[in-house]
Image (cartoon, rainbow, N blue to C red):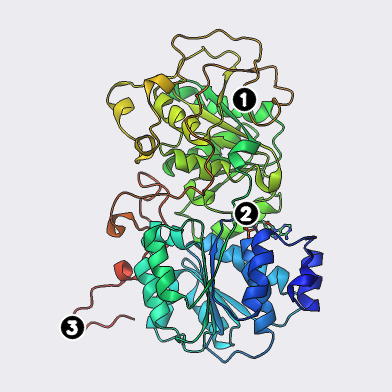
Amino acid sequence: MTFSDLGLGPDVLRAVADAGYVEPTPIQRQAIPVILMGRDVLGCAQTGTGKTASFVLPMLEILAAGRAKARMPRSLIIEPTRELAAQVSENFATYGKYHRLSTALLIGGTSFTDQERSLGRGVDALIATPGRLIDLFERGKILLSDVKILVIDEADRMLDMGFIPDVEKIVGLLPRIRQTLFFSATMPPEIRRLADKFLMNPKEISVSPPASPAALIEHVVVVVQPDHKREALRKLIESESVKSALIFCNRKKDIGALVRDLTRHNLPAAELHGDMPQSKRTETLDAFKRGEIRLLVCSDVAARGLDISDLSHVFNFDVPHNPEDYIHRIGRTGRAGRSGRAFTIAAPEDGKYVTAIGSLIGTPIKRMETAGEPVLALEEDSGPRGRRRGRGGSKRHGGAHPAHSHAPQKPHATQTPNAPPTSRPAPHNPHPTHEPHQTQAPAPQRPAPHRPITPHPSGPPQQRAASERAPNDHRESGAKGFSDDLPAFLARPLIIKGDKRD
Ligand code: AMP
């Protein structure tokens, strides 16, 4: 089947051909004809399946007939994070290059004035995060009564982030007669309830996730004392042929220092985290995608669903305490069937977190030693810190069971590389200063996840939400993996009688 069999017009087909797509993906094959017929869709699909084009391409076709009025968008796409919203907006520009449709991106951290100006010109497709959309609506800058197509993307992630009340509020502001396209990677009962509420006689489409990135990636852990981590990272970067790499820190306060350290050692690096102004975040990410930045030291804000092509390496400067965060981090490499390499620098006391990750990915994590560094064992449980649970991670995945531990029982000597039974070939040309060798690999306790891993913050939304309007929050210093946007009801100031909001 080709794209021309799906009922798309010549302008869309030309743009798709320019993008280099030959064949529609399964979600595109199933969703595009149904959307073109005007039906609601309930899509169970995750990023990496071609989901964005599955709704953007038919939307372009539908929107091509008609014109937008000022401040009255004709379609609305709601995304959970600013980065995902920006990515969808880029997709609209790519696929809509032969159309004369206008889009606007309403996300936090950017100027209201520019956004209001673009709304004033009339918008065919409005792409927004919930917080900023509600803000602008409440300021009277936008009318939602002309929205004919609504897309709710990544619904389960919105749930995780505490955005569902905002989404329900937004949907309540839309005309009842409209076409609704609802996408979620998973369908827990709460999401199903929303789908039942928002959709009318939808066509249900479910596609299997793309090959698990974990299976395409080579996973390596290097164990050093905490004060040797920077040096170990530099050695790794120097010994690997790194085309481009993300380097993840658990705490954003460590990011700047690590950037300076790398740069001082002739490894120029840039930073990306939630405390940076949105304009700087976007600029940095764009420069990284263009290849102008090779090493990007970041917090987990960079780990969510971003489509960064051809990333050769991910380095975890710290072991994520929640193994699901590991999946998000390493999922930035090994995309579109490419292989990738993920290195994790662990301190001995990180043993239980490494075990939990091994269990979750179902692929052995190889141990690698660094020349000149003592051979250290990963401790399974090491006093109060070792006993503490990461944010629900090992608890949920039963990671640190002694029977499944891959912590060495005693320090091991460097040995001849002994390829583990990974699902891809043994590593290419290990560097002489790093001799990979298999220690007791974690016995996979379950197969690599076949569903996307989503964070499950443990607290109520009030404790979880991070704010696009509160840049100095601490979401990355202890509360990792939280949202970019604050649910509007939390951000709303207390209105005291006689007080004016603006
Ligand atoms: P998404 O699931 O929307 O995040 O898309 C994942 C990646 O697949 C993006 O880089 C798209 O450019 C790419 N893509 C989407 N549709 C196709 C297709 N039919 N053929 C090849 N690549 C595609």
Tell me the distance, in whole angstroms, between the alpha carbons under discs 2 and 3: 49 Å
**Would the CB of label 2 be found within 8 Å of ligand 1?**
yes
Can you identify the residue that label 2 sits on? 48
Q: Which residue is drawn at 46% across and 15% down?
A: 377
Can you identify the residue that label 1 sits on? 235
Give the mark nearer the N terminus: 2 vs 3: 2
Can you identify the residue that label 3 sits on? 497
* Up/down of 264 relative to 476, above or below: above
Tell me the distance, in whole angstroms, between the alpha carbons under discs 2 and 1: 32 Å
Looking at numbered disc 2 in the image, what kind of residue is underneath it?
Gly
Q: In which quarter of the image is ligand 1?
A: bottom right
Tell me the distance, in whole angstroms, between the alpha carbons under discs 3 and 1: 61 Å
Q: Which of 424 and 302 is in front in this view?
A: 424
Q: Nearer the viewer, residue 290 or 223?
A: 223
Q: Is residue 216 left or right of residue 462?
A: right
Q: Residues within 10 Å of mark 1 (few under 14, many from 20)?
A: some
Q: Which residue is drawn at 67% across and 59% down?
A: 26
Give coordinates of residue 90: x percent, y percent. Answer: 65, 66
* Up/down of 283 relative to 292, above or below: below
Looking at numbered disc 3 in the image, what kind of residue is underneath it?
Lys
Q: Is mark 3 on a helix, strand or loop?
A: loop
Give the mark nearer the N terminus: 3 vs 1: 1
Q: Nearer the viewer, residue 319 or 203?
A: 203
* Up/down of 40 relative to 81, above or below: below
Q: Residue at x 42, y 42 (%)?
A: 253
* Up/down of 342 relative to 297, above or below: above
Q: Which residue is drawn at 66% across and 71% down?
A: 32
Give the mark nearer the N terminus: 2 vs 1: 2
Q: How crowded is mark 3: few (under 14 residues within 10 Å), some or many (20 or more)?
A: few
Give coordinates of residue 213: x percent, y percent. Answer: 61, 42
Number of numbered discs present?
Answer: 3
